[in-house]
Amino acid sequence: MARPMKWRKVCSLPEINKFGPLDSPADAETYVNMTVDEYETIRLIDLEGFTQEECAKQMNVARSTVQGIYIEARKKLAESLVNGKILSIKGGEYRLCEGLGNGCGRGCHRHRRGRCFTEDEDRGD
């Protein structure tokens, strides 16, 4: 029997969820889809300067899980940049944090932005 899924804790959804040549035709071949938890690893490790271990603690998952998520996220970034594809950020297996004071740490963006999103909020496609 497989282990139950452990949800990845994410502190904020991206304000903009599409990047790249936005005038490209909207077909599956011109898109690369990055999940929100992949976005969070890029944000924490590359932007905030976390180690993989710190990122894992922040997201409430194992370091090896973060490593796998991070590798996939970087491949998707490279595919988008090198092949001129639209990077779309949506979906994934995550839960939004509840903000500081509820197990969130220094990488939390919810307290910085002054607004909170729910998981159900449509971020647009």
Image: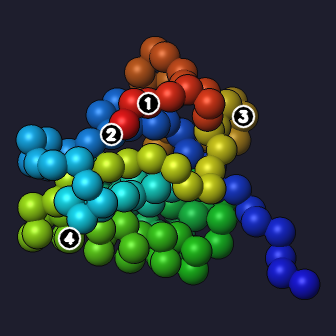
Judging from the image, what secondary structure is the residue with disc 1 in? Answer: loop
Which quarter of the picture shows residue 118? top right
| Alpha carbon separation for disc pair 4 and 2 | 16 Å
**Mark 4 and mark 1: span between their CA atoms?**
23 Å
Q: Quadrant of the N terminus?
A: bottom right
Vertical position of residue 8 compared to residue 72: above or below: above
The first of marks 4 and 1 along the sequence is 4
Q: CA distance from mark 2 to mark 1?
A: 7 Å
Q: Disc 2 designates what residue?
A: 17
Give the CA distance from mark 4 to mark 3.
36 Å
Q: Residue 123, labelled with which disc?
A: 1
Q: Residue at (48%, 70%) from the top-left corner?
A: 69
User: Which label's residue is closer to the chain start, 2 or 1?
Assistant: 2
The residue at 49%/78% (across/down) is 68
| Residue 17 position (above or below residue 1) | above
Q: Amino acid at mark 4?
A: Glu
Circles 4 and 3: CB distance less than 8 Å? no
